[in-house]
Amino acid sequence: RAKGAGKNQYCVYSEDMGFQELRKMELEKDLYLALDNEQFYLVYQPRWNVKENGLAGWEALIRWNHPRLGVISPYEFIPIAEETGLIVPITRWTLKQASLQCREWHSRGVKQPVSVNLSVRLFQTESLQEMVQSTLKEADLDPLWMELEITESMVLHDIHEIIAQVESIRSMGVKFAMDDFGTGYSSIGLLDRIPLDTLKLDRLFTNNLEIPTKRGIISAIIMMAENLELEIVAEGVENQEHVDFLMQLGCHVMQGYYYGRPMGIEEIEEWMKQRSIL
Ligand code: C2E
Ligand code: MG
Ligand code: MG
Ligand code: MG
């Protein structure tokens, strides 16, 4: 048993180790090989401007096609990638892929930005700025078309260090978005300290729009974001009712299943063709 095992005893797992822990161990072991074995791929979810009735960008979301377990959600493997440090090479790959894909769509006449999610762990590697710069250069994508999504959980880290890095990356022209805003450590104070371009309202808000008191809070957040000159994007928009409420509150850029799920390249190209975008 793992707990009772002496220091020098070889112990891979214990009988009472739960299924979850075993799965995590297996995923961790396999994650080291996943990049080399080309098991990652990106799906893209459209961002939609309702006012202009048009595409406003794509968010790149990573998937892991595990050889035995099938497609694994980033909710499951990103934390493991963070713990092991593998998040660094994985993010480098993601930035490059997303940039290449964005560039390709640009060359076919669809000029929109692409968003990539950054884990806070990336800010602890001093080379983040270099990583962003070199991947954009390799893909020949103008930094103006790249948006990086960060989350509020970074308040737990050295905020001065993060602000300095955001500033240096942003000076290249790259945009920054606060993702999942309103969840977790929701600190409004962060908003005027970190130089941001976009505020993404967490889908929890979108799902609570039916509740009048919640609507008041969302309305206040939207007004505040407007004052800070941030673009507001609502996440988790799933139906026309959500759209109507958000429009009333002054938010007209949306992302969610109602407009489009995260899709593979072929599927999203079909989606764009159907809407005469591509
Ligand atoms: P996120 O960045 O907030 O991405 C939005 C998530 O909500 C996506 O889940 C998307 O599929 C889902 N979603 C979109 N529209 C709707 C909707 O209308 N209803 C509902 N119920 N869900 C919706 P996904 O793709 O599983 O990604 C989960 C999270 O994993 C992301 O949340 C992001 O934090 C993280 N993630 C994804 N790709 C990457 C990556 O390349 N790097 C890093 N560091 N994190 C990533
Ligand atoms: Mg995101
Ligand atoms: Mg989000
Ligand atoms: Mg979210």
Image: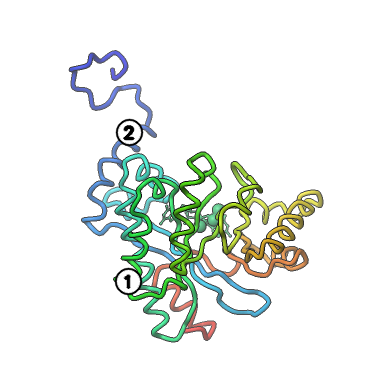
> Residue 22, which numbered label?
2
Total marks in image: 2
Task: Give the structural element (helix, strand or loop) at label 1.
Answer: helix
Q: Report the quarter where the N terminus lies.
A: top left
Q: Residue at x 39, y 50 (%)?
A: 122
The way the protein has been coloured in the rendering is rainbow
> Residue 108, position in %: x, y?
41, 85
Q: Amino acid at mark 1?
A: Lys
Disc 2 under 8 Å from ligand 1? The reply is: no
Decide which of 192, 230 is in the foreground and name it: 192
Q: Residue at x 33, y 60 (%)?
A: 130
Residue under circle 1? 137
Q: Amino acid at mark 2?
A: Leu
Relative placement, left or right, of 63 versus 148 is: left
Decide which of 174, 252 is in the foreground and name it: 174
Asked if 111 appears above or below 248 in the picture, the reply is: below
Q: Nearer the viewer, mark 1 or mark 2?
A: 1
> How far is mark 1 from mark 2, CA to CA?
40 Å
Task: Give the structural element (helix, strand or loop) at label 2.
Answer: helix
Q: Residue at x 44, y 61 (%)?
A: 169
Which comes before the other along the chain, label 1 or label 2? 2
Q: Quadrant of residue 104?
A: bottom left
> Residue 182, position in %: x, y?
64, 49
> Residue 258, position in %: x, y?
60, 66
Q: Which residue, as the protein is rendered here, is positioned at the far right?
A: 212
Q: Residue at x 38, y 75 (%)?
A: 141
Q: Quadrant of residue 12?
A: top left
